[in-house]
Amino acid sequence: MGAKPAFAPPVPRRSHTVLIVSLVVGAVLLVCGGGGVTVVGGLFYVTYDNAQNSAVDAVETYLGDLRDGRYQQAYGRLCLEARSDRSLDEFTQAEQTAGQVVSYTIEDRVGNDQDGNWVLTAQVSRQGNPPRSELFPVTFATGNTAQVCP
């Protein structure tokens, strides 16, 4: 009969290196992938927000020109299509007939028409008329310049 050794050889431990490396790589990919989505989403939001502010500013400036009787400047803020449809004199005559803009309030929310174009709504008070809601379609020219395009 043989004698039992006092100490048994150590049992090799299972290595967790592959598991640890896999978890670290997975966490890095998750953070980077999620960060990429966040960055792209953030850029989209900032671009949209800037465009929306530009559209509101375009309508604000246009109505301010009409209020102050600066018809030539207001006409220059129209999109090319609207300017090609009527002359400055025709535009001025139509605006004077509608009544001088006295005051206005532009809604912050941008809507869309049936073609997907942006439309802003403003409550416009014109001389001799009660305030009413008016729609102002906005297009973006080259260089992302917002223009009113009624």
Image (tube, rainbow, N blue to C red):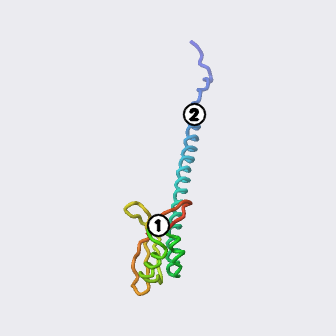
Image height of 31 relative to 12, above or below: below
Look at the image and tell me in which quarter the N terminus lies: top right
- Tell me residue 41's x, y (percent): 52, 55
Q: Earlier in the sequence, mark 1 or mark 2?
A: 2
Instruction: Give how far across and how far down residue 30 sits, in percent.
Output: 54, 45
- Binning the other alpha carbons within 10 Å of mark 1 as few (below 14), some (14 to 19) or many (20 upward) gives few
Q: Residue at x 53, y 67 (%)?
A: 54
Question: Can the viewer see residue 60 in this picture?
Answer: no
User: Is 141 placed above or below 34 here?
Assistant: below
**Which label is found at residue 18?**
2
Quadrant assignment, res 132: bottom left
Q: Residues within 10 Å of mark 2 (few under 14, many from 20)?
A: few
Q: Give the image location of residue 116, x and y in percent.
A: 41, 60
Looking at the picture, tell me which residue is in the foreground, 18 or 76: 76
Q: Disc 1 residue type? A: Ser
Residue bearing the label numbered 1 = 84
Disc 2 marks which amino acid? Val
Quarter of the image that includes the C terminus: bottom left
Relative depth, front residue between 27 and 67: 67
Q: Is residue 65 visible?
A: yes
Q: Position of residue 8 (x, y in %)?
A: 60, 23
Q: Residue at x 47, y 79 (%)?
A: 104
Q: Mark 1: which secondary structure? A: helix
